[in-house]
Amino acid sequence: MPRLLPAFIGVSTPKLENSFSVHLPVGSLNSCVLSSVVKYLPTMRHLADIPVLAAAIEAKVEFIVSGNRKHFNPATAARAGIPMYSSSEFLAKMVES
């Protein structure tokens, strides 16, 4: 089976690409990605986003902010137990606080 992930996963945002990047060592992520494919592909519908979600799960993040609401959607959020917001939803939530 080919490697699912490179030696490090780089997660960055296009607008902040020069100032924000997270690099996670793969280690246990391969098994996390494999189990995540089965569990989350039905709601995400896009295989390329599964490693991002798997990394978030492995890192035990409090929430995910993504412009990709088609794949990081309410059904995936409910299944993963991680709140997922668009940038405008997240900003609105911060204003409420």
Image (cartoon, rainbow, N blue to C red):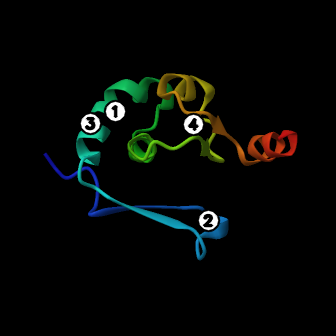
Density class for disc 4 (Cα within 10 Å; few <14, some 14-19, many ≥20) is: many
Which three-letter amino acid code belongs to the residue tagged 3? Leu
Q: Are marks 2 and 1 in contact (CB under 8 Å)?
A: no
Residue 75: percent from left, percent from top: 57, 23
Using a 10 Å C-alpha cutoff, classify the residue at mark 1 as few (fewer than 14 neighbours), some (14 to 19) or many (20 or more).
many
Disc 2 and disc 3 in contact, CB within 8 angstroms: no
Mark closest to the chain's N terminus, 2 or 3: 2
CA separation in Å, label 1 and label 4: 14 Å
Residue at mark 2 to residue at mark 3: CA–CA distance? 27 Å
Q: Which residue is mark 2?
A: 14
How far is mark 2 from mark 1, CA to CA?
A: 25 Å
Residue furthest to the bottom: 18
Q: Secondary structure at mark 3?
A: helix
* Residue located beneath label 1 in the image: 37
Chain-order first, disc 3 or disc 4: 3
Q: Residue 34: which numbered mark, if any?
A: 3
Q: Are marks 1 and 3 in contact (CB under 8 Å)?
A: yes
Q: Nearer the viewer, residue 91 or 73?
A: 91
Q: Is residue 59 left or right of residue 25?
A: right
The answer to which of marks 2 and 1 sits earlier in the sequence is: 2
Q: Position of residue 58 (x, y in %)?
A: 38, 43
As rendered, which of 38 and 22 lies closer to the eye?
22
Quadrant of image for the C terminus: top right
- Distance (Cα) linking label 3 and label 4: 18 Å
Using the numbered discs, state the Cα–Cα distance from disc 2 to disc 4 in whole angstroms.
Answer: 17 Å
Residue tagged by mark 4? 72
Residue 78 has which mark?
A: none
